[in-house]
Every structure is written in structure tokens, then in C-alpha cells.
Image (spheres, helix red, strand yellow):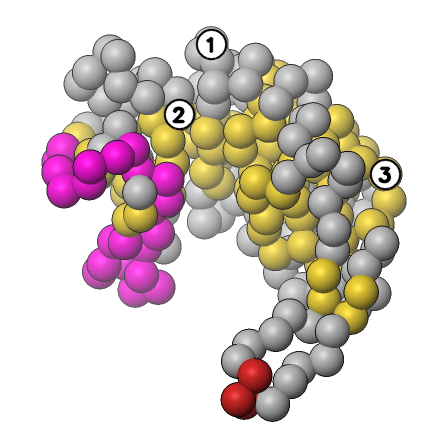
Amino acid sequence: MSSAIPLGSANDGPRPLLVIPAPDKDYFWELAYLPDGRRVVTRADGGTVKVWNLENGGQEGTSMEHKSELLGLAVTRDGKKIISSGEEGSIKVVWDVESHKLVSDWTCSDGYPKIAISPDDRFVAVGSWTVKSYSMEGEQVNQSFDIGDEDALVWCMSFSPNGDKLACGIGGNIHMYDVKTAALILGPLEGHNHHIECVLWSRNGSGLFSAS
């Protein structure tokens, strides 16, 4: 299922230490490290979430299944919960990473949801044609964030390190919101020719990086 490949010399260039093949005819679309650094979580075609051991390349436990294609994946900072979203609008929370037990399964009002977890692990931002903030139990905790264009789609989101701001890639623009008030405080910032796939904050929260 996996193969360990030793590092070559410096002249050979970088080589992988471990290769984990995707299931037949599937692709890994996203991954997230668990805080222990020994395991990684993946989402793949077919609506499956899996946990992999990086020491031996083997899958840990059973796969976690969605009924539709997966669009989002996130891991809480305490390493206890995995959150995934499906294109039909379902949000699934696995509270116990060790047992893969599904504790919460709720549906947001819009399809195609992308997700981001607040730094304190209390809230989940869900974005599609709107942006909303929910508790881990699926209760909306504030008003919807105004994304301006009703035809625009949210492609990615990221909370600032202190959790007071939310950056969103909406189409090819960046919007930044105040989390408490849901007010737009910066943007839309232009500069991308394609939709934004990723937004990341610097560790001190002073910089924002985006990729399309």
C-alpha cells in the first residue's frame, strides 16, 4: 500500500520518504496534518476521508464516508476532531479521531460548502454563495457575511491567528471580514486572473498570502 524511499544525495534533488498511493481511479484532493505530526488526513474522490500513519504508510481505522463529492477538510488544533463538507451541503464532524465516531451531521442552507475552523476550535466558517459561522453542533452564531455579488462563489477561507478576522477567496478577489460583526473591513482586493484556491495568514497575522 505504501513504499518508503530513502533520501538520495544532494545532487539527486529532493526525494520522497514515503509514498501513499491513492485508491484505484481516485485522487487525493486535500490533506491536513494532525498536530502530533505522525498522521495525515486526506479527502479523495468518491467522498472518503481517511487517516494515514506516516511511519508505515498504512491507513488507520475505517474510512469516513460522504454521500457526495467532498469539497472541504479541516482538523481542529487539539487534534480531536476532523470536519469535512460535501457538495450536497452536509457538514460532518468526527469528534474522536481515534475511533472515527461521527457525532455531528448537519446541513447548511447552500450547496458546495468550503470550511475553515476558528483558532480556538469553537466555530466553523462555511462558505459557498454566502459565508456563515456555525458552532460545532451546527447552530448559526451570527448573521451572514455579505459577499456582495450573489453570483460569486467562495473558494477558500482562513481565520486570522487570533480569530478576529476571516479572509475569503471569492471568485478572483479577497474579502476580509470582522468575525464578530460580519462586516467587510477590507476588499474586495483584486489581482488574480482566476478564482482563488488558497488564502493563508502569516503566523503573526500581519500578512496574507493567496494563490490561484
Establish if 185 lies above or below 106.
below
Q: Are marks 3 and 2 in contact (CB under 8 Å)?
A: no
Tell me the residue that label 3 is attached to.
Answer: 62
Point out the tag, 1 or 3, that comes first from the N-terminus. Answer: 3
Q: Residues within 10 Å of mark 2 (few under 14, many from 20)?
A: many
Q: Spatial distance from mark 1 to mark 2, Cα to Cα? A: 10 Å
The answer to whether 108 is drawn above or below residue 103 in the figure is above
Identified at 25% across, 53% down, the residue is 208
Q: Which mark is residue 109?
A: 1
- Residue 11, image x, y percentages: 53, 89
The numbered mark, 1 or 2, whose residue comes first in the sequence reads: 1
Q: Secondary structure at mark 3?
A: strand
Residue type pointed to by label 3: Thr
The range drawn in magenta is 187-209
Q: Give the distance between the C-alpha atoms of the residues marked 3 and 2, in whole angstroms.
A: 28 Å
State the residue at coordinates (48%, 40%): 117
Disc 2: which residue: 127
Give the class, few, some or many, for how many residues have Cα within 10 Å of label 3's Cα (few <14, many ≥20): few
Residue in front for this viewpoint, 159 or 33? 33
User: Is residue 185 among the parts visible in the rendering?
Assistant: no
Dot 1, crowdedness within 10 Å: few (<14), some or many (≥20)?
few
Q: In the rendered structure, which amino acid carries the disc numbered 1?
A: Ser
Label placed on residue 40: none
* Vertical comparison of 101 with 91: above or below: below
Secondary structure of the residue carrying numbered label 2: strand
Q: Is residue 97 at least partly visible in the picture? A: yes
Quarter of the image for the C terminus: give it.
top left
The mark that comes first in sequence, 3 or 2, is 3
User: Is residue 21 shown in magenta?
Assistant: no
